[in-house]
Amino acid sequence: MKILVSGAGGFVGRKLIEQLSAGHQVVALDKSCAGLVPSPELTVLEGDICDPAMRETAISDGVDALVHLATVPGGGAEQDTDLAWRVNMEAGQALISVAAGQGNRPRVIFASSIAVYGEPLPAVVDDTTPLRPFLFYGAHKAMMEQWIATLIRRGAIEGLSLRLPGIIARPPAPSGLKSAFMSNVFHAALAGESFVSPMSEKAAMWLMSVEQIARNFQHALTLPSDAFVEPYAVTLPAVLVSMKDLIEEIAVQTGWDSARVSYEPDAALEAGFGSYPPLKAERAKALGFEDDGSVARLVRAALGHIRKGTKGES
């Protein structure tokens, strides 16, 4: 397949392209693709997704599939609503429309988010839970899900929106994500530093390693066409873990002293990112999507990714 990946220079994009480049032609589109490893199968396009000429260039030679990751995330979208609308809505719709305009009914896999559910959440989230986004980011994702579903019904594309949980462990740099604490705790542990948790010990989160996220996107690209049926969006399975259990498992695997953690809960932050109930992602599981399997495997994968990156290998 020839696959276009938008947001290719980001955290998930780099890991996905690392996996896709073995066996596919990949076109990577982002403002900066500095972290990508060159290969004969990879074409890099650095530019602004909001630029119509850049979107046309990205698809000028045709693509079989588009993985749309590019986004202005939660905190960034709240701070700059105009930029978030241009990137998350206008540019996203335009890029997918250009791909659809080829006339070959390309496969579109969209990175949606659990932010579409908003807050407060019900006692259990399953495939019937309604969308009630609170953040602009979540609203953008929900609207894009509907846009993509409409194009699928019209026969212009085939595809699926994947609602992503929290992804760990991101690099220790500004990401625009209010949930950055989920990754920062890993970096504090590896550095032997103290950590102030903005979540209480009992705060519960849905988490997945970046390796597993990338595998799930790769899986979506290989599904048979008859797997794509209404409502054209699935919530990925995830490991439900408390902040206390996450910290204790990190300590077990790194030798970090968990006594270096203090808890200063932010009520608003915990309401939005630490109050997740059990998740029943039955439809996603039936389609073959998977989570990391356990807290121990989740933490091991996240630490492995950080250590690999520290050696300059990713």
Image (cartoon, grey):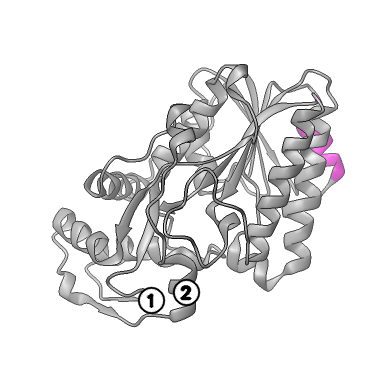
In contact (CB < 8 Å): disc 2 and disc 1 = yes
The reply, left or right, for residue 247 in relation to residue 238 is: left
Please tell me whether residue 266 is drawn above or below residue 39 in the rendered image: below
- Please report the residue visible at 17 percent of the width from the left and 53 percent of the height from the top: 253
Residue 280 painted magenta: no
Q: Could you tell me which quadrant the C terminus lies in?
A: top left
As shown in the figure, which amino acid type bears the numbered disc 2? Leu
Residue at the disc numbered 2: 269
Please tell me whether residue 176 is drawn above or below residue 58 in the rendered image: below
> Label 1: few (<14), some or many (≥20) within 10 Å?
many
- Please report the residue visible at 69 percent of the width from the left and 21 percent of the height from the top: 64
**Which residues fall within the magenta stretch?**
52-60
> Label 2: few (<14), some or many (≥20) within 10 Å?
some
Tell me residue 28's x, y (percent): 64, 35
- Please report the residue visible at 63 percent of the width from the left and 27 percent of the height from the top: 229
Q: Could you tell me which quadrant the N terminus lies in?
A: top right
Tell me residue 37's x, y (percent): 50, 35
Tell me residue 218's x, y (percent): 50, 28
Residue 58 painted magenta: yes
Please tell me whether residue 191 is drawn above or below residue 291 in the rendered image: below
The secondary element bearing badge 1 is classed as loop
Residues 81 and 125: in front is 125
Residue at the disc numbered 1: 198
Dividing the picture into quarters, in which one does residue 117 lie?
bottom right
